[in-house]
Image (tube, rainbow, N blue to C red):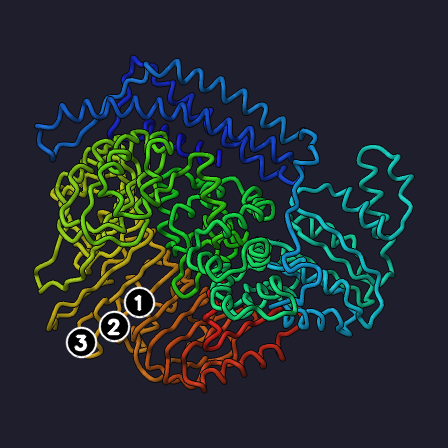
Amino acid sequence: MAYGAIGSLELTIDRLLKSSHISIVQNSSPQILTHLYDEILSLKEALGEFDKWRSTINMKMVRTLEAEIIHVVYKFEDVIDLHLSNQFHSQSEEEETTDHHRLMVYSIDVEEIKQDADSFIQTVNKIKGAYIHELHNPSPEEDDDVVPSRLDSHGNESNMVGLSGLFMTIKKRLNSTNPERRIVSLYGMAGIGKTTLVKKLFQYPFRVERTHLFVTIGPKYQLADILVDILTQLNANIDEIMLMEGEKVLVELKRMVFKSLRFLRYLIVLDDVWDRELCLELLELFPEDNNKSRVLLTTRLSEVALCSHSLNTFKIPFLDKKESWELLREKMFGERPCPRELEKAGKKIAENCEGLPLTIVTVANILSRADKTSEHWNKVANDKQNSTYKDAYDQMSNVLYPSYDYLPQPLKTCFLYVGAFPQNHMVDPYQLANLCSAEGFLNSKPIELDFSFTYGTHVYLAQLLVGHVIMFDAKTRTYHLHSSFWYLCNKEAAKNKLFYAVNCHADALPEEGINSQRRLCIRNNVLLAIEDVHNSIADASMVRSLLCTGYFHQYPVPLCLEHLRLLRVLHVLSVRFYEFPMEVLKLVQLRYFALVYDGNLPPSISKLLNLEYLIVERHLRIIPFVGNVSRLPIEIWNMKRLKYLHTGGRDLPHPSHEESLLPNLLQLLCVPPQSCSKHLLAKVPNLEVLVIQIDLPPYASEPLSCFDHISHLHQLQELECYITNSTLKAEVVAPLAPLSDFPSSLTKLTLSGSFGYPWEEMNKISLLPNLNSLTLQFYAFRGPEWEVRDNEFQSLIHLQIEDTDLEQLTFENCCCLPAIEVFYVADCYKLKEIPLTFGTSLQEILVLDCNPMAVSCGIKLQKEWYDKYGDGKRSLVLRPLSSWNDDQS
C-alpha cells in the first residue's frame, strides 16, 4: 500500500520534470524537484526490499512503518498538489479569453515548497532507515502477533464435501507402483480446503508402509526451524548440532535430514508453502531412492505448485451450489435433516458463500448461535451485505490477510483497487491496468510471467491470478474478487485512505469523513442527484479520483467537478452523458478520463494537456451512412501526452500541420478503417496496439481497406479488427494485405466478423516470425478445409477459432505448430476433423459446442498424445463442451 502511495507522488514529480507544457521558473531552485525525485526512488527501492526479506520479518512492525510512510507521503502530496493547482488555475484563468488553439505552457515556481520538500526528505529518510533496519533485523514478535495463515475449513470430522473425487485421484497417485519419488501439489485460494484434503490423505492407511511427516511452513519461516521439525518427528538426536554456531548449524541440519531419510520410505507433507526456492531446497534434501517415497505439497501460489510435474499438480475447485448446501447443512444439523421451512433460505445462504468452504463453515458457526427461524434466515439469504457475512469475513481475516500482506509490493495497491468496484463486479483487466497506471500504482518494469498464466490479461496484474487473490472468468475474460477478499480490500482501503466507497446516502455525510478522502467510489449513481450528497462531495476538495462504478445510469446526473480541482482520474463509464461535461476542461491535472457520450468532443478538449488516457465510449451504436462519419476534433493532435485513446468509432482527423504527431500514443482503439490511411498511421509511429472497428453502412458495396498501411507501424504488437454488424452476404472488406504489409513485430492478431477470407489467404500471415496468438471469430475465414503447412506459424502459442463453417483442420505433417500450447475451437458445428499430430508443447485443448465428431477427435488426440509423450512430466488437458462453464478457472 505504501508502495502505491509513493508511486502516485513519483508520477506527479516525474510529470513536472518531463512535461513540455510546464516550465520551472529558474530562480526558484528547480533542483528541488530533481532531489525530491531521487529521494522518492530511493524510498521506493527500500520498500522493494520487502519482497526479499518477507519470510523473516515482523509484519506488525513493517505495517506500522508503512503506515507512517503513507501518512508522510499523503501530507506532502497535498502540499505540492495544492501549490500546483493554484498556479495552474490562476494562469488558466488569465488565458480564458485567448484562442483555444494556442498551446498553453505553465510557469511553475517551486520556491514556496522548498521548506516542505526539505522537511519531507528528512522525515522519509528517517523512516526509510528504520524500515531497512527492521527488514534486516526483525523485532521480536509477541505471541499475539503470530497469526495462523490457514484453518481447517471443513472441520476435523468433515465428510470431505466436494473433495472426495480429488481425494480418490490423489490417493491413486500416491498408491502407484512407480518406485520413483513422486511429488504431488495442491494449490488454490485461502480457505479452499487444501489442508483438509492433505490431512485426510496423511491419515489414510496406504497399503505401502511409509514413515509419515507433517511439516507446516507458512509465509514466515526459518529454514533451520523447518529442518529441526523434520528431525524431531524422525526422533533424531540434534543436541550436538544445536550447540554449534553460525552457518555450521544449517549445514549440519541439512546433512542430517538427508542422512535420516536415506533409504527410508516416506510420505512427507509440506503444508502451506509460500516460497518456490524454499520448496526446491527442501526437495533436494529428500532422497530419491526409488522406494515409492511421496511428497505432498500445499500452497496458495501457482508458481510454487509447479515444483511438481504438471500431471501431479491439482487445483482445488470451488464448491458448486449443491456441495455448498451439503456442507452448510452438515455443519448446522449434522446427521439430522434441515427443517423444511429453512431449506430454501439455507440454500441461498450457501450460494452466497460463493463456493469457499471456509466461508460456509464460518457462516454456519455464526448461524448456529442465532435464532433458527425462517425470518432470520431469509434476512441473511436476501442480503449479501448482512452482518452475518461481514462477521464471517472478519473471523476469516487471519487466514485471508497473508495473501494480501505477502503480495509483491507493486501489486498490493492494485489488488486493493479492484475492491473499488461493486461486490461481484467483473472488471476488465485492461481497464484496471489503465486506471492503476494513471494512479501511479504500477511499476515501470513488468513482472516476468509465464504466458500460460496471463490468459490474455495485462502482464503486470496477472501475478494476482498466480497468487489466487483474484479470479479470472474465462467466458468474459474479466477479473473478479471473491466476496471475502472484496470485503478485505474495502476494509484495508478505508483504513489507509486509498478509496472511500459511497454506497448509500449515509456514507456521504460529513461526519463519515468524506471531506478528507483521496478517492471516491460512487456505487449508486442516483446519489449524485441528491442535494446534500452532491454538496458533501463538492466539499471533498482533496479528492484525486472520482470513480462511478455502480450500475449503468442512462440519465444525466451532476458531478460537481468544478469543486474537485485536484482530480487526476475521472472514470464515469456507468453514467450516460447527453451533453459533454464542459466543467471537465478546468481539471488541468486530469490524467485519465473515461465517459459514455454519443456526441462530438469539443475542440477545447486539448486544454487537458496532462491527459494520458482518453476513453469515449458510445451508448448507441448507430451505423452511419457512407460519408457521414463522426470525427474527433483536429485539436486531438495537440494532446501530446496521450498514451491510450479509445475513439468509440470516431475517425481520426487529418492534422493541419505536417509536423503533428502523437509520439506517446501506444494504444489506439475502436477506430474506423478510414483512420488507417498511410498519412494518419505515420502520425502515431510508436503505436503498439491497434483495434479497428468496422461499422458497415447499409447497402455498402465498396471494399474497405484495413491493412494496406499497417507496415508503417514498426512497433505494433497487437492488431485486432472487428466487424460489428457482420453479414455473410456482404463482400465489403478488401482481401488480406500481402505479408510484407504486416510488421514483423506483430505478436497477436484477432479478426472477428464476416471478412470471409478463404483459408488459402492464411499464407499471408502464417510466416510472421513473432506471432504467438491468433484468434479467428465469426467467419473471419470461410471454407470447408484448412491445411497447416510445416513452415507456418513457427512461434504460435495460442490458436482460437470460433463460429466458422470449417469442416476439416489438418496438418501437412507432424512438425506443424511446434510451439502451440493452447488450441481453442468453439461453435464450429460443421467441424468433423482436427489434427492428431500436435507436438509436446500442447498443454490444453478446448472443444466447445462443436460437432460431436470434433469432440471425439479431441479425446482421441489426448489419448494418442499421452501414448506418445506421457512420460509423467507432461500433461494435456482436454475441456470439451460444458466444462468451459467452470468460471473459477
Mark 2 or 3 closer to N-term? Answer: 3
> What residue appears at the point 53 percent right and 80 percent down from the top-left corner?
861
Residue 420: tell me if it is visible.
yes
327 relative to 203 in the view: left or right:
left
Measured as percent of width and height from the top left, residue 816 is found at 48, 74
Mark 1 to mark 3: distance in Å? 16 Å
Q: Nearer the viewer, residue 421 or 41?
A: 421
> What residue appears at the point 24 percent right and 39 percent down from the top-left corner?
640
657 relative to 150 in the view: left or right:
left
The image's mark for residue 59 is none
Q: Residues within 10 Å of mark 2 (few under 14, many from 20)?
A: many
Helix, strand or loop under label 2: loop
For mark 2, what is the residue? 755
Residue type for callout 3? Ala
The answer to whether marks 2 and 1 mark residues whose Cβ atoms lie closer than 8 Å is: yes
Measured as percent of width and height from the top left, residue 213 is found at 80, 56
For mark 3, what is the residue? 730
The tally of labels here is 3
245 relative to 686 in the view: left or right:
right
Q: Residues within 10 Å of mark 1 (few under 14, many from 20)?
A: many
Q: Quadrant of residue 508?
A: top left
Residue type for callout 1? Leu
> What residue appears at the point 44 percent right and 81 percent down from the top-left corner?
810
Measured as percent of width and height from the top left, residue 864 is found at 58, 81
Residue type for callout 2? Phe
**Rendered view: 230 above or below 836:** above
Mark 2 to mark 3: distance in Å? 9 Å
Measured as percent of width and height from the top left, residue 448 is found at 51, 49
Mark 2 to mark 1: distance in Å? 8 Å
**Rendered view: 564 above or below 549:** above
Q: Quadrant of residue 660?
A: top left
For mark 1, what is the residue? 751
